[in-house]
Every structure is written in C-alpha cells, then in structure tokens.
C-alpha cells in the first residue's frame, strides 16, 4: 500500500500563495489517479485538483485559474501550487491516491488564509 505524506501547509494572508507537496512511497507511474482534496470541519471532503492517467488534470470550479497541480515522477512527488488564496480556501488538505482498487489518504496539512 502506498504511503502519502503531505507538507507545505501554513497560515497566509488573503491574496498570498502556498505550495503543498505530497510524497508518495511508490512510483507515480503505477498510480493512475492522484490528487488533492480538502475538508472543513462539519463539511464533506471535496476534490480540489486531480491528475488522472498521468496527463488529465481536473479542478474544482472554486479553484480553477488560481491553483495548479503538477507531479515529478522522478521524485514521486505531487504538488499543489495555490495562488490568490482566499479565506474560503481554509481547510485541511489531503493527498489521495487510487490504484488497483486501493484508495489511500495522507494525514492532511492545514491551510489557513487569514489577515
């Protein structure tokens, strides 16, 4: 089973930027679906950005144009560049990987957007 470790969360002012990182314990070439979700207490976890089949990226409407997902297959890393952050982006962000019937989550990293 793949292990996922997120990092890069923190507190930033509105309009600022953060880059989240997700380190995977196995080759990204073997993971056809990997991406980022987020969750606010009391609400359902929602998809933020995903890379499917190594090529196709999808974004939530609320982040399209502000966030960018990318991966480095040599390092088995997935990144989420978040720009023009808004207070409503405040959440715990989770890395998620799906392959061969497995659905794995990282431990999450807190992102807080506040002045």
Image (spheres, rainbow, N blue to C red):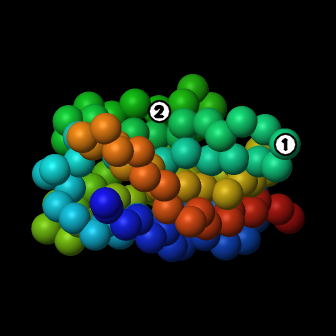
Q: Nearer the viewer, residue 18 or 8?
A: 8
Name the residue rendered at 75%, 63% in the picture. 112
Q: Is residue 35 visible?
A: no
Of 111 and 85, nearer the camera is: 111
Return the residue at label 2.
59
Is there any visible trace of residue 43 in the rendered image?
yes
x and y percent of residue 44 in the render?
71, 36
Residue found 65% across the figure and 40% down from its top: 45
Counting from the top left corner in percent of width and height, residue 47 is at: 54, 36
Residue receiving disc 1: 42
| Crowd band around label 1 with a 10 angstrom C-alpha radius: few (<14), some (14–19), many (20+) | few
- Near-viewer residue (78 or 99): 99
Q: Is residue 36 above or below residue 109?
A: above
Relative image position of residue 17 (x, y in whole percent): 58, 62
Which is more toward the observer, 34 or 101?
Answer: 101
Label 2, secondary structure: give it. strand
Occupied quadrant, residue 99: top left
- N-terminal of the two: label 2 or label 1? 1
SS state under label 1: loop
The spot of residue 97 in percent (x, y) is 37, 49
- Figure quadrant of the C terminus: bottom right
Is there a contact, CB below 8 Å, between mark 2 and mark 1? Answer: no
Nearer mark to the viewer, of 2 and 1: 1
Whether residue 40 sits left or right of residue 101 in the image: it is right
Identify the image quadrant of the N terminus.
bottom left
């Amino acid at each position: 089973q793949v292990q996922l470790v997120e990092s890069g969360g923190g507190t930033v002012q509105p309009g600022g930027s953060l880059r989240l990182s997700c380190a995977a314990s196995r080759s990204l070439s073997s993971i056809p679906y990997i991406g980022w979700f987020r969750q606010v207490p009391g609400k359902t976890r929602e998809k933020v950005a995903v890379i499917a089949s190594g090529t196709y990226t999808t974004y939530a409407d609320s982040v399209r144009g502000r966030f960018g997902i990318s991966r480095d297959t040599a390092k088995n890393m997935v990144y989420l560049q978040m720009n023009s952050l808004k207070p409503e982006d405040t959440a715990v962000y989770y890395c998620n990987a799906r392959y061969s019937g497995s659905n794995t989550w990282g431990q999450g990293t807190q992102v807080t957007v506040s002045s």
